[in-house]
Amino acid sequence: MTQPTPYSGRPLTPAPGAAAPELRLVRLRRHARHLGWSVLVLVAVAGAVGYFTGNLPAPFEDWMLWAAAGLVVLLLVVLPYVAWLSHTYTITTRRVVEQSGFVSRARREVSHARGYTISEKRGPLQRLWGAGTLALANGVDAPLRMIDIPAVRLVHETLADQVEISQILAHRDGATASAGERS
């Protein structure tokens, strides 16, 4: 059950007093360009192993080469990828959630209804890739920093819209609740 809106393209709002379902809008990670060095290391290690297998000097054996290559790939390719994969930002219709950690998870949330300021910072390389860093500060807690996220302008607009919609719905629902108490 939703209220009709005169504007096309605008999201439908729930009826007054009805609970709005929480929907996931987007899940983000840091820009993947940080994994570029890992890709170069992986290609270089694969080329070196292919070239040196069977061509090593006398005191070295092939298993040593493969063990060293495996260690390099583990440290410089797999661990950065797992670290990148384990840090996410999720934007829903009610809040922004930051989750990090692979073994033990840490989680932070900022509610849209409570309101916050959004500051955007973009360096030269970030502008080149369309990425940037957003800081969400509500004035009470430490700011939630969304570091080097892709499509930062679109995310900024989405967050501003969600804050506005959440505050409008909270104000509307608060007004209808107080009007119901008076009658």
Image: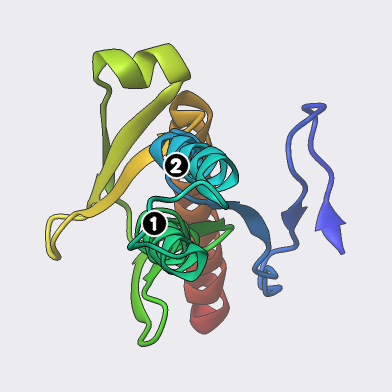
Dividing the picture into quadrants, the one containing residue 18 is: bottom right
Left or right of 32, for residue 37: left
Q: Residue furthest bottom?
A: 104
Q: Are marks 1 and 2 in contact (CB under 8 Å)?
A: yes
**Which disc is residue 69 wearing?**
none
Q: Amino acid at mark 2?
A: Leu
Horizontal arrangement in the rendering, residue 120 relative to residue 141 (left or right): right
Kindly identify the amino acid type of the residue bearing the numbered disc 1: Pro
Q: CA distance from mark 1 to mark 2?
A: 7 Å
| Residue 90 on image: x %, y % | 52, 59
Q: Residue 137: horizontal and vertical position, in percent?
A: 20, 50
Q: Residue at x 53, y 75 (%)?
A: 177
The quadrant in which the N terminus is found is bottom right
Q: How many neighbours does mark 1 have within 10 angstroms: few (below 14), some (14-19), or many (20 or more)?
A: some
Q: Could you tell me which secondary element the residue under label 2 belongs to? A: helix
Percent from the top left, x then y, of residue 64?
41, 67
Is residue 87 visible in the rendered image? The answer is: no
Residue lying at 35% horizontally and 87% vertically, measured from the top left: 104
Q: Position of residue 56 (x, y in %)?
A: 44, 50
- Quarter placement of the C terminus: bottom right
In the image, is residue 60 above or below residue 157?
A: below
The numbered dot on residue 80 is: 1
Who is closer to the viewer here, 116 or 7?
A: 116
Q: Is residue 145 above or below residue 82?
A: above
**Image vertical order of residue 45 relative to residue 24, above or below:** above
What residue is disc 2 on?
35
**Helix, strand or loop under label 1:** helix
Residue 80 or residue 170, whichever sits in front: 80
Quadrant hosting residue 120: top left
Query: Would residue 99 appear left or right of 18 to someone viewing this image?
Result: left
The residue lying at 45 percent from left, 19 percent from top is 129
